[in-house]
Image (tube, rainbow, N blue to C red):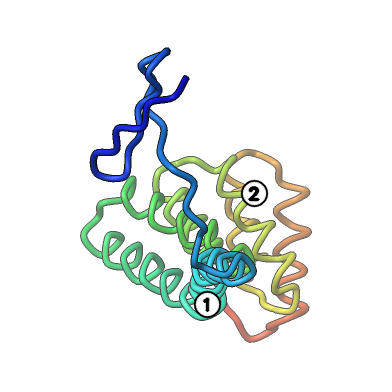
Amino acid sequence: MKANRTHHNVSMDAHAGALHTPHVWDPVFRPGRLLTLLAFLAVPVFLCAAFYWIGTRRINNFFARLGAAQVQEHNYPAAIDSFTWAVRIVNNDAHSFLNRGYVRQEQNDDENALADFTSFIALRPSEAAGYIARGRSYARLGQHAAAVADFDAAIAREPDNHLSYA
């Protein structure tokens, strides 16, 4: 048997001592709730997309400029980190690959510099700078045939560039 003792819209079952809230019809229209939920999900997705499309290039530029400033201060490990973030954000940023390769050359890390220069060359095959830099790394590693091939490629692209004639 149920003894209804209501206190603040709560009834108590006399036998079990359990509290039950009375069933109240939800005045909010259920499709309206779905629309609100979708709006709350759509707004963050839209903001993330806007950040990605508009903001990634700006953030990439921030890290590329930071890396260049760190090179000027001779803080090479931090510069490598900054250029790494720049290429993580925009993976086709050829000049961040090139600059990170230069810093790695400065740190005598020619193995990793080769990978950066190769990435630069893949993105900008018509520019001699990548071939010159990669040729220097090959020469420092004792891979003279590869170095000569890269210097020849640089000369073919910019015959007047004196750096190509190593």
Question: Where is residue 48 shown, x and y percent of the image?
Answer: 52, 68
Disc 1: CA contacts within 10 A as few (<14), some (14-19) or many (>=20): few
Question: Where is residue 52 shown, x and y percent of the image?
Answer: 54, 71
Is 149 left or right of 101, judged from the image as shown? right
Residue matched to label 1: 50
Say if 62 sits above or below 80 in the image: below
Q: Quadrant of residue 41?
A: bottom right
- Tell me which amino acid carries mark 2: Ala
Question: Where is residue 153 shown, x and y percent of the image?
Answer: 77, 69
154 and 23: which one is in front?
23
Disc 2 to disc 1, C-alpha distance: 32 Å
Is 164 left or right of 109, judged from the image as shown? right
> Farthest left residue?
73
Tell me, yes or no, if residue 21 can be seen here. yes
Residue matched to label 2: 115
Question: Where is residue 161 shown, x and y percent of the image?
Answer: 60, 81
Residue drawn 64% across and 49% down? 115
